Amino acid sequence: MKYFKFLRFDLREGILKKYKSYLALACLILIAFLDIQTKAEAVGNKLTLGEYMFCIYGGIKRYVPTMGDPFKAPYLWLLNHLLILYFTLNYTPTDLNGFGQQTIYRSGGRLTWWFSKCSWQIIASVMYYAVSWLCLGALSALNGISPSLEITPTVFIYVPPGSGVVPFDRLNLASELLLLPLLTTVSLGMLQLTLSIIIKPQVAYIASAAILIMSSHTQSPLLLGNYAMAVRSDRIITEGMNASAGIVSMIALSVICAALGALKFRKYDILCKEE
Amino acid sequence: MIRNELKRAVFSRTFLLALALMTLFAVLSAVFYIEEWGGYNPNALNDAISEDGSYRFSPQFPLYSLLSAWLGGDTLSLAYTVFFALIPIGSALPYAWSYHTERKCGYLKNIVSRTTRAKYLTAKTAAVFTSGALVILIPYIINILLISAYIPYNMPWAGFNLYNRIYFGTMWADLIFTHPFLHMFLFVMLNVLYGGIYALLSYAVSFYIKNIVAVIFAPFVATLAVGYSENLIYSRYVATPVRFELDPTKFLHSRSVQYMQNPWVVLLITVLLLGFAVGTVYIKGGKHEVF
């Protein structure tokens, strides 16, 4: 029961009252949509909703360091993840330095508080994606775009896949476009939440930013961001990332972070917190 | 006052943390090049580049020299990518948040009742700028010293500009072919200046946002937004084939990693950012409610 009270409070304070951040993300999606639409119309292409999503969540092709060809960061992909992680970074430490401290004393449920924060982190990330998807869905409906999540090789004009493309005519990338970017943000959010308790929120955000930037530069299963790039999926390129492995590793990371955080928080000094 | 602020800015755990973070990537970049290009066997290198006892010139050699391997000339490693991306965070981390904390804990009340606000703001601005600048300068020095210990210097050849990534007309392009070390020095100084500017921007943001984490990371997120916007602007509105770099973390690189660096654009952006930061500090800081 206590858990639900905590969670209800977190949903109100950490999601409803942060509506401006959802609007900011919706603006980013709107700008990205209009940009892709202009590019598609310029060459007479009619993209599906899946192809729009591929342009936004697709990421960037595997980078092969070559003299004269410096790495170019996938800003839209980075912004999508780092904005959500930025918006969710400070809620827990702020709550712990204020109202949260009181609720922990009075309820005596430290672990309940912690698991409520973990649930909030997951729900908040899901909500940010839900807003993005709703925004994309509404824009597609308004512009008469097919709601199919299938992509065709035409989309490679906008997000080139590099070498070793698996031949296909049409491909349904629902898990790579919907589930994996969301799971990446959730697992990095959980890592960030745990690090912000164990070390500091500043270090936690630097870790998230570094993981995502390194993921965009180097293709490796150890860099989780790679799973969130549909263009590096093994269904698109021969030496790509496997979605199942990504799902398992991201769920494992989230569970480990929640458990580590719970262990740390049981004996955490909540009184001596300063910025 | 300035001495006290400088001491607090530089002899702090956050300064060490930021310095360690930036130095880590500067050293990793150096290690990457030393591993790839470092002459493990000087005799073999000598044999490869000499003929009948005298050196023969190959246009390939200048590409694999100190000037392409130092952090500002690196266009290949993962470490340089992260280093440049993290410049806004690394610079802000040491001391940019201090005004926010001093106001919140009441320290500021004690200061402004003992000295003038202008003196306090000047000392704080100097300390914030210096801490941000040092966090960028020291990793550069370590990187250049490490690289120069293993990888020889060779005058770059203008014919290989596609690989050099120094286009004709880009900022200080002529200097690299005449005075390459001056070119290197100017870019290091530009980076150091931006270390200070990013720290000041975070400091300025603390007059608008009452959240320490948001204060530190706001310039980083804004820089990402600029990086995305410049591609958007160029693809939608600017048809010209000559495109100038607007994102500071990219024009700080001595090579054109995406678009060309134009000195006037760099100057304009620098003046605007510096003007915003210093203007906010003195105008908002002068009126800010302390008591």
Image (tube, rainbow, N blue to C red):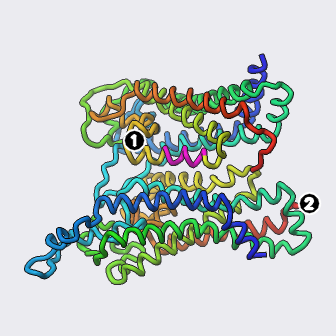
Which residue carries the number 2 mark? B291
Residue in the picture at 52% in, 60% down: B22
Q: Position of residue A81 (x, y in %)?
A: 54, 40
Which residue carries the number 1 mark? A41
Q: Is residue B272 above or below residue A129?
A: below
Seen as rendered, the residue at the extreme top is A1
* Number of the front mark, 2 or 1: 2
Q: What amino acid is at disc 1?
A: Glu
Q: Is residue B222 above or below residue A180?
A: below
Relative placement, left or right, of B63 versus A189 is left
Main SS of the magenta part reads helix
Relative placement, left or right, of B12 versus B187 is right
A94 part of magenta stretch: no
Relative placement, left or right, of B9 versus A64 is right
Please tell me whether mark 2 sits on a helix, a strand or a loop.
loop
Q: Give the quarter of the image for residue B94.
A: bottom right
**Residue span colored magenta:** A204-211
Q: Give the quarter of the image for residue B64.
A: bottom left
Q: Chain of mark 2?
A: B
Q: Position of residue A228 (x, y in %)?
A: 45, 35
Q: What amino acid is at disc 2?
A: Phe
